[in-house]
Image (tube, grey):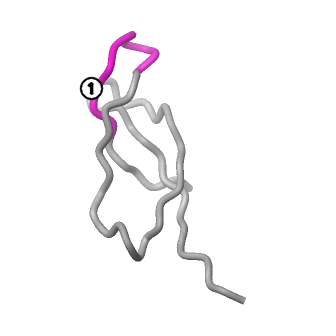
Amino acid sequence: MASNTRIKIGLKCSECGDINYTTTKNSKKTTDKIELKKYCPRLKKHTVHKETKLK
């Protein structure tokens, strides 16, 4: 059976600090942290969201 290299991550808003989105990424192919521009419902605008670990 193949080993599972995908890990769960959270996307945290860089302005308000809320974790608004969760996703998975391949930890072997993507070693650097993900930064995406996503919509923040608290601020009601698009902001940069950075990768954080989930428990």
Residue that sits furthest to the right in the current view: 1
From what the image shows, is residue 33 above or below residue 4? above
Q: Which residue is mark 1?
A: 15
Q: Residue 34 location in percent, x, y? A: 32, 51
Q: Main secondary structure of the magenta part?
A: strand
Say what secondary structure mark 1 lies in: loop
Q: Position of residue 8 (x, y in %)?
A: 55, 57
Q: Quadrant of the C terminus?
A: bottom right
Q: Does residue 49 lie above or below 28 as drawn? A: above
Type of the residue with mark 1: Glu
The reply to whether the magenta stretch includes residue 47 is yes
Residue 25 percent location from the top left of the image: 47, 60
* Residue 31 placement: quadrant: bottom left
Q: How many marks?
A: 1
Looking at the image, which residue is at 35% across and 32% down? 13
In-front residue for pair 5/12: 5
Q: Is residue 55 magenta?
A: no
Q: Residue at x 40, y 50 (%)?
A: 52
Residue 55 sits above or below residue 17 on the image? below
Indicate the quadrant containing the N terminus: top left, top right, bottom left or bottom right.
bottom right
What span is colored magenta in the figure?
40-49
Q: Is residue 50 left or right of residue 7?
A: left
- Residue found farthest to the bottom: 1
1 up-or-down from 9: above or below = below
Image coords of residue 2 (percent x, y): 66, 86
Q: Residue shown at 37%/49% (left/top)?
A: 51
Frontmost residue, 21 versus 53: 21
> How crowded is the residue under tag 1: few (<14 C-alpha within 10 Å), some, or many (20+)?
few
Report the residue at 32% width, 20% height from top.
46
